[in-house]
Image (cartoon, helix red, strand yellow):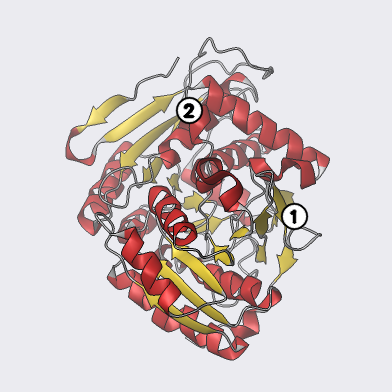
Amino acid sequence: MKKPYVGVLGAVAALALTACSSGSENDLSGTRATGAPIVIGAQAPIKGATAYPQTAYGLEAGAYYINEVLGGIAGRPVEVDVCGGDGSPETAINCANGFVSKKVPLVIDAVDQSMGAAVPILAEANIPIIGTLAGSFVADSAEYGKAFYFTGPVSFAALSSMSVLDTMGKTKASLAVNESPTSHAYVDDLILPIAEQMGIDVSVQYPPASGANLNVVAATQLADDPDIAGVIALPEDACTGLFQALRRQGYDNSILAGSCSQFIDEMGADAAGIVTQPRLWVPLAKEAAPEEVRRQLEEFEQAMDAVGYGDQASSRSLYTFAALVNIAKILSENGSDDVTSESVIDAFSSLRDFPTFAGPNATCDGQQWPGIATTCNAQAIFFEVQEDGTLQPVDEAGYMDLDPSLMPAS
């Protein structure tokens, strides 16, 4: 069954997700958690024009998996109090104040672009922020110990996207990203300088977050005669619409999909040749993944099915699912079921070469990326869609190292 959200709290729409047995048939089995729940916070972009509701679905599936399979955190079940972000700093501030008043031991950044507004409040309360990747530059730039991210910073995505174009021999790109001040700063301060160093000519379109005419965006991209079109970042539906428009208008060359993935099912054979850049191994790449990663991805899919969101097993839901599972495993390894902000910070500060869920090894020593102490790994992974809809890594080794020296000086 699909379990409804409970505990909606006023204007911030906080949602408490507690895992329960769904009654769905799946192959998951393990140890059920018991006792009083450990409540942690999460800020997820589930409202507004740039909402990614999949982030909340991943948290719900993660709580189910932890409580029904992994035995909770040191035996106790986890409960996730989700505050619904809408992209505004005002909502993020309200969320942060709510978490402080509830004295949660940590807050998950579910890749919320407005998370930066919450950083000073949570830092003052000594509540660490944890996630697969940050939703904003401000969250990335938090002081060491105030935030921990299992993969590279926001700026890392700019270097990785241009690096994959360089690896593929692309020299002229036309890419879209939603209109916003942060989007312009990201392009002007990172994408364009990195591309120039690599000899890549990049033109950028800024469609509105809602109501964009994607046929016009596609036509604008094709007018540049690029050897690769696509996106820097758009919501899943917009990615699919743009890629379909490009194919309808006769474009059969490479497409860059950013972290989007839902287009693969909807586009069928037309998706072949599209390149994605998620932070983790994803379900469609299972056959090419190491054995342990294949098992993890199967269990992710089964957990999403169990909570009624099997059709929403996207990169976004995987990011939040993986973050929550990693947190539970790391805190469980400490052996104590008394989870406090201090114990969380201690556990993450001492983390070395930890194998993350479907991702790279994490070392949270503050030295993994120049000038960004919150980063616990600086490797990238890229996939190309095959004709049968599966994914193959662009680099046969899977994760590949990047060259941070190409980053613009701050």
In the image, 217: left or right of 346?
left
The residue located at (60%, 70%) in the rendering is 160
The residue pinned by badge 2 equals: 309
Query: Residue 403, position in %: x, y?
Result: 68, 79
Query: Where in the figure is residue 325, as x and y percent of width and height?
Result: 59, 37
| Camera-side residue of 249 and 254 | 249
Please provide percent x and percent y for residue 76: 55, 23
Q: Amino acid at mark 1?
A: Asp
How packed is label 1: few (under 14 Cα within 10 Å), some, or many (20 or more)? few
Label 2 CA crowd tier, 10 Å (few <14, some 14–19, many 20+):
many
Query: Which residue type carries mark 2?
Result: Tyr
Residue under the point 40% across and 82% down: 188
- Residue 108 in the figure: left or right of residue 354: left
**Residue 165 numbered mark, or none:** none
Residue at the spot of label 1:
353
- Percent position (x, y) of residue 105? 45, 41
> Is residue 332 visible from the viewing direction of this image?
yes
Q: Secondary structure at mark 2?
A: loop
Please determine whether, in this image, residue 405 is positioned above or below residue 220: below
Q: Quadrant of residue 372?
A: bottom right
Mark closer to the chain start, 1 or 2:
2
Q: Residue at x 32, y 56 (%)?
A: 118
Give the secondary structure at mark 1: loop
Tag count in the figure? 2
Query: Does the rendering let one see residue 127?
Result: no
Residue closer to the observer: 127 or 234: 234
**Which quadrant of the structure image shows residue 208?**
bottom left
In the rendered view, does 18 fall on the left or right side of 368?
Answer: left
